[in-house]
């Protein structure tokens, strides 16, 4: 009604707006309250003054009474500010003068309120009535202003019309939570990303970067997503980086997940059950590696599994990263999405950004929205954040960027209007003053409002029930340049006890334990805070004032890093070292006996060591430095036990830095433990150069200490291998190898043969079951001899170095290492690995019975040592002897398990080799129900996963890419445009064979040549490229002589297809002008292949070999004119391949039988066989090969 009256009168009183506005006010006053305002006006003529320009205009009794008499000391902090629930209304009547409003019962404002009008509408009427008063600051100047106020009330009555709750009239400023000001454009971008990933799931995952200066409201944007996320059963993982804990990225990341799980436990039980099941399925027993990092996870899954991982060093670190990635995949699902926030990324480092890159670029993620917030004024082009963004862009992950600046004047006014529940028209002068002093920084604006309230320049008028301010005093007030300086000034006015508490808490870090505060208070000479209740009272006051936030019982953190910085700045920089040192000393004294080796005082060990580190510059006595070094050693070892590698590295490095050269004599044990532990941590983190530098002092000073020297050598050799410096690794292991009579420069076939004979004798081939040998091994005790353990571990490392540069030496080391397993009185966890390697070597040498016995021993020892080398032994056995003892398809699942294990511990080399084997076997030994399209999907998936996991490793995947191209040559009916139509050339959409061969030559990948010719051998025979097939046989034979360590799959492929090509060569030479020697050479190749296949079939795997034997026998029979044998053998090959699920070789057998029948003139039988071959090739998915046979039938 009021709005309509304003709109009607605006057209009639354009020339006399003031009179028209006053008239509307009079009309509304009479209409709503039945009161003639002239009666009140005449009673107060001449008493109007500007209430907003002079706080004295209202008596002190009119102001809201503060808790203390001094308005500057009301609660002592930002503390008069409270964050309440949103209220949304004008809070008080605004008046042109206190006289019109009055302070008594007879005021016009009271009469209007008594009539039931909201305070906001009272304000409008009073302002209309004051339109003709030239001194009234609140008066309306135009119809448009009045219409705007009334329009807001209609559009948003909760915010602008209805009265707020009475508890809002307590004189404190109420900031509405989760309300954004001046961020419409930024919020639209955030909401768009949220919709794409969480709502419509148009994108499986994505990354949103939010940047801006300190206090610009970056995290407020994310907070606003909580409610819409919760509506979809989603939650936020909040990972906040800390300027005081930049060295401990893993702690911050794991704390974020732990807090997520704590919230999950307090929520929906159904959601808890779903996520618990997903985690158990995704992580399995590996989750126990997170036991100390994310303790609440154990409660979520109903208890930690009994079985656990068994890794160390770098493998454990990689396993943690792998489990964190799997954890995100488990908690993020379309039915319960997740937002992972990385807050304050400007304090992240390379290690944490690597974790973020791993999570964000994981293509298996779904319903996961990743958000990063950082201060753009602290991040340049060389900062890890900038480089991380570049890596994410390269990975083609959907990326959105939001830049926040300061607020404009209107947005600041919107905030002021909201906080004080007044019309924006009334708060505009105040907002303009605030903006000029803060440049519109949101946090600075809020703190300045609080400061003005503390000083009484902004106050709540109890009689008017609205906020008032002294605009002139505010305009001339000197204000700090930023929010931190303003906060410091405010904190200096606090009581001494509260200042002390904030100073000490800030020294402990952004997050602190109240127990530590209590201990320090009781030890403080200058403070009388020994009473825990007093400490708690001060902390609760800080919480109520918005300075601190309570996380859990006794654990608190500062509500903003700017508030932490202000508290920390209360201590002059020149005094901080001494303060940190005093805190460290006092906590150490309070929590331990004072002995640096006393493990009973570990409750605050990390806190003590951190404080002593920050105060080390104030330490004058070297004896105390040595004691602090001992504490750092204990802290480092404790961090390592929880797999906190980065904190461990920091503690250990600090300990090393406190030692002097002469300490190697006086404190040898301390020195060697510190330097060795630090070197091993650097190696675990992938810093190979750092590991080598750290181990050097041990190699220099540990002479005469054999155990320490062995441990140092092992670290050195592992670092060499990680750097691909294999020759150097072998040289550094030469001393240990020399003790075992292994000369790295003199390994010849005779020496290898001698060691082979010794090893065979120890294997006791007379015991076919191997039971006596197994019982003998299992009865041996586990070795505790550090020298024996160190020796075999160095042999373990040396095999990997020798494989790369001296394969013969590798065989020699494997044989000698295996002999130690049998001859030593004790065994180690590495024994199973040694016997697994022996099985691989013996398989390559054709000694299958001995190899199989060795494999059984290796598997038995795995159980003994809790499967420490399970991935490695599984891989070794399933790429060698087990392919001769069980269906080759059965090896596939074991290899997939080993691959997942290698990926989880970051073993890039064996993960890559596993992919190669999985790719080859999946094609050559099809699994039941799977076609080539399925195989292609799996190969592409693992290639993508590997490339994402190991950035820059594309060249390592060329063998698997080659198998992918071979698969495409089988299934694509026509090659891509511009590609040779010859299916035996491995060039197409996946790879270029010339580039492949060039890479192999440049990198010295001799085995890769062999696998390439194996593929060409297969394709050349399959597509009847006879000349190329025969040339490839010669190349394969030559390469086989120089490579004994080849996977069984390749050996089987070579043996089978070389035999088939040889039989075909004999057939084509019969009746032609060929020499007898030439035919005999091919006959020998065919016969040798047949004999090998027959032996393998008889040894234990008819499944894999019997149909191969039948087909090769049929082809040889055809070559020699024995057609009856050929017919029966073809039938046996077709039947056997079908029973063994080798659809590819069943199709090949039908094709070869069909060609045989055509050659014999039996056209119908031949056509029947070829038609069946076409059907089988199509069923397998080899469409190009099916087309080839159809074209053959047509010819």
Image (spheres, rainbow, N blue to C red):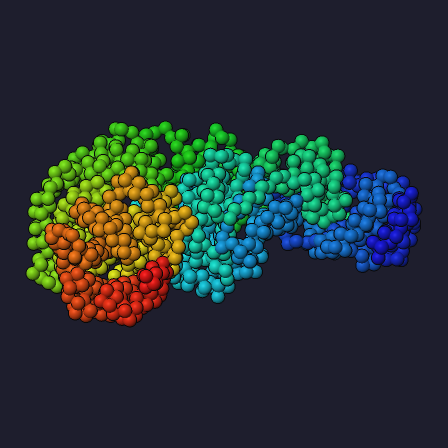
Q: Is residue 757 left or right of residue 255?
A: left
Which residue is at a point 55% across and 41% down the rendered structure image?
A: 211
- In depth, the one of 1081 and 699 nearer the eye is 1081
Q: How many marks?
A: 0
In the image, residue 685 lies at what x, y percent?
34, 42
Please name whichever residue, 309 or 931, is drawn nearer the observer in this view of the structure: 931
In front here: 158 or 1140? 1140
Front in this rendered view, residue 637 or 460: 637
Q: Which quadrant would residue 133 be assigned to in this image?
A: top right
Name the image quarter holding the C terminus. bottom left
Q: Is residue 741 visible?
A: yes
**Is 906 placed left or right of 505 in the picture?**
left
Residue 402 drawn above or below residue 662 = below
Above or below, 1195 relative to 434: below
Question: Residue 1078: x percent and y percent?
Answer: 14, 51
Q: Position of residue 111 (x, y in %)?
A: 84, 55
Choose top left, top right, bottom left or bottom right for residue 749: top left
Q: Position of residue 502 (x, y in %)?
A: 52, 40
Quarter of the image where the N terminus is located: bottom right
Residue at (31% x, 38% y) in the render: 688
Which residue occupies 47% across, 56% down?
366
Q: Is residue 861 visible?
A: no
Residue at 26% of width from left, 43% of height from top?
1005
């Amino acid at each position: 009604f009021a709005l309509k009256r304003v709109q009607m009168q605006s057209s009639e009183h354009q020339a006399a707006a003031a009179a028209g506005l006053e008239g509307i006010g009079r009309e509304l006053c009479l209409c709503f309250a039945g009161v003639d305002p002239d009666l009140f006006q005449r009673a107060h003529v001449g008493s109007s003054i500007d209430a907003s320009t002079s706080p004295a205009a209202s008596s002190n009794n009119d102001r809201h009474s503060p808790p203390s008499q001094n308005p500057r000391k009301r609660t002592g902090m930002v503390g008069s500010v409270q964050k309440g629930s949103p209220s949304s209304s004008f809070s008080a009547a605004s008046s042109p003068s206190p006289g019109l409003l009055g302070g008594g019962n007879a005021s016009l404002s009271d009469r209007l309120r008594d009539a039931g009008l909201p305070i906001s509408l009272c304000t409008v009427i009073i302002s209309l009535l004051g339109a003709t008063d030239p001194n009234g600051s609140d008066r309306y100047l135009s119809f448009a202003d009045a219409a705007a106020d009334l329009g807001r009330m209609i559009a948003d009555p909760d915010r602008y019309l209805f009265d707020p709750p009475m508890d809002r009239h307590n004189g404190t400023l109420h900031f509405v939570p989760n309300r954004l000001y001046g961020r419409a454009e930024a919020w639209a971008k955030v909401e768009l990303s949220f919709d794409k990933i969480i709502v419509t799931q148009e994108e499986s995952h994505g990354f949103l970067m939010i940047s801006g200066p300190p206090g610009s409201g970056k995290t407020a944007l994310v907070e606003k997503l909580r409610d819409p996320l919760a509506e979809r059963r989603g939650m936020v993982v909040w990972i906040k980086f800390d300027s005081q804990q930049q060295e401990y990225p893993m702690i911050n990341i794991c704390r974020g997940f732990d807090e997520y799980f704590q919230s999950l436990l307090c929520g929906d039980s159904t959601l808890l059950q779903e996520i618990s099941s997903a985690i158990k399925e995704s992580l399995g027993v590996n989750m126990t590696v997170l036991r100390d990092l994310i303790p609440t996870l154990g409660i979520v899954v109903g208890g930690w599994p009994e079985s656990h991982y068994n890794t160390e060093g770098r493998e454990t670190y990689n396993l943690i990263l792998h489990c964190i990635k799997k954890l995100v995949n488990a908690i993020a699902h379309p039915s319960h999405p997740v937002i992972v926030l990385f807050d304050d990324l400007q304090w992240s480092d390379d290690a944490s950004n690597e974790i973020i890159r791993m999570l964000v670029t994981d293509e298996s993620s779904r319903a996961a929205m990743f958000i990063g917030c950082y201060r753009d004024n602290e991040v340049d082009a060389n900062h890890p954040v900038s480089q991380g963004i570049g890596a994410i862009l390269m990975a083609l992950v959907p990326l959105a960027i939001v830049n926040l600046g300061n607020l404009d004047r209107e947005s600041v006014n919107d905030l002021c209007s909201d906080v004080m529940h007044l019309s924006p028209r009334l708060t505009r002068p105040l907002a303009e003053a605030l903006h000029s002093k803060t440049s519109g920084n949101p946090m600075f604006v809020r703190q300045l409002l609080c400061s003005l309230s503390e000083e009484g320049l902004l106050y709540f008028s109890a009689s008017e029930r609205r906020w008032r301010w002294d605009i002139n005093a505010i305009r001339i007030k000197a204000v700090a340049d930023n929010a931190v300086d303003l906060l410091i000034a405010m904190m200096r006015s606090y009581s001494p006890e509260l200042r002390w508490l904030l100073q000490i808490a800030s020294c402990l870090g952004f997050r602190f334990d109240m127990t530590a505060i209590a201990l320090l208070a009781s030890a403080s000479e200058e403070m009388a805070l020994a009473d825990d209740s007093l400490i708690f009272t001060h902390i609760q006051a800080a919480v109520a004032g918005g300075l601190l936030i309570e996380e859990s019982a006794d654990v608190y953190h500062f509500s903003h890093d700017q508030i932490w910085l202000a508290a920390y700045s209360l201590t002059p920089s020149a005094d901080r070292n001494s303060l940190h040192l005093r805190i460290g000393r006092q906590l150490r004294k309070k929590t331990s006996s004072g002995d640096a080796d006393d493990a009973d005082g570990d409750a605050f060990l990390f806190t003590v060591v951190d404080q002593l580190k920050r105060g080390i510059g104030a330490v004058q006595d070297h004896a105390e430095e040595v004691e602090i070094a001992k504490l750092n050693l204990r802290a480092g070892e404790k961090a390592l036990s929880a797999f906190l590698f980065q904190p461990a590295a920091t503690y250990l490095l600090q300990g090393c830095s406190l030692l002097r050269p002469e300490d190697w004599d006086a404190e040898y044990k301390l020195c060697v433990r510190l330097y060795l532990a630090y070197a091993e941590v650097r190696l675990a983190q992938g810093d190979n150069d750092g590991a080598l530098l750290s181990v050097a002092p041990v190699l220099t000073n540990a002479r005469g200490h054999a155990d320490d020297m062995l441990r140092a050598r092992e670290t050195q050799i592992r670092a060499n291998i990680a750097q691909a410096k294999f020759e150097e690794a072998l040289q550094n292991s030469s001393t240990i190898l020399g003790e075992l009579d292994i000369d790295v420069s003199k390994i010849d076939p005779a020496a290898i043969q001698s060691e082979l004979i010794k090893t065979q004798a120890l294997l006791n081939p007379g015991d076919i079951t191997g039971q006596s040998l197994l019982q003998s091994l299992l009865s041996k005790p586990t070795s505790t001899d550090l020298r024996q353990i160190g020796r075999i571990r160095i042999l373990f490392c040396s095999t990997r170095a020798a494989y790369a540069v001296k394969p013969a030496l590798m065989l020699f080391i494997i044989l000698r290492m295996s002999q130690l397993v049998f001859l030593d009185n004790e065994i180690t966890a590495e024994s199973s690995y040694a016997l697994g390697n022996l099985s691989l070597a013996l398989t390559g040498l054709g000694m299958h019975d001995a190899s199989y016995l060795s494999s059984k021993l290796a598997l038995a020892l795995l159980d003994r040592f809790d499967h420490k080398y399970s991935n490695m032994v599984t891989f070794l056995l399933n790429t060698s002897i087990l392919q001769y003892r069980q269906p080759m398809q059965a090896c596939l699942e074991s290899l997939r398990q080993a691959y997942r294990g290698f990926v989880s511990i970051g073993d890039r080399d064996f993960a890559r080799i596993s992919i190669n084997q999985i790719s080859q076997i999946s094609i050559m030994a099809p699994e039941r129900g799977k076609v080539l399209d399925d195989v292609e999907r799996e190969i592409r998936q693992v290639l993508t996963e590997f490339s994402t996991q190991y950035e820059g490793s594309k060249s390592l995947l060329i063998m698997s890419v080659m198998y992918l191209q071979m698969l495409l040559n089988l299934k694509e009916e026509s090659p891509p445009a511009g590609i040779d139509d010859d299916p035996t050339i491995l060039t197409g959409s996946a790879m270029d064979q010339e580039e492949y061969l060039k890479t192999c030559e440049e990198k010295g990948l001799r085995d890769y040549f062999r696998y390439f010719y194996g593929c060409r051998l297969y394709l050349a025979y399959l597509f009847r490229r006879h000349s190329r097939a025969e040339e490839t046989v010669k190349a394969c034979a030559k390469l086989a002589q120089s490579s004994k360590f080849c996977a069984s799959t390749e050996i089987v492929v070579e043996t089978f297809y070389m035999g088939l090509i040889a039989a075909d060569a004999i057939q084509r030479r019969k009746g032609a002008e060929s020499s007898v020697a030439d035919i005999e050479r091919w006959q020998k190749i065919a016969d040798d292949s047949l004999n090998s296949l027959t032996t393998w079939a008889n040894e234990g795997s008819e499944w894999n070999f019997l149909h191969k034997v039948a087909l090769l026998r049929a082809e040889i029979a055809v070559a020699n004119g024995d057609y009856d044998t050929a017919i029966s053998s073809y039938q046996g090959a077709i039947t056997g391949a079908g029973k063994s699920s080798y659809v590819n070789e069943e199709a090949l057998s039908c094709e070869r039988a069909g060609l045989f029948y055509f050659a014999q003139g039996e056209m119908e039988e031949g056509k029947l066989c070829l038609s069946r071959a076409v059907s089988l090739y199509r069923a397998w998915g080899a469409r190009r090969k099916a087309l080839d046979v159809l074209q053959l039938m047509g010819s």
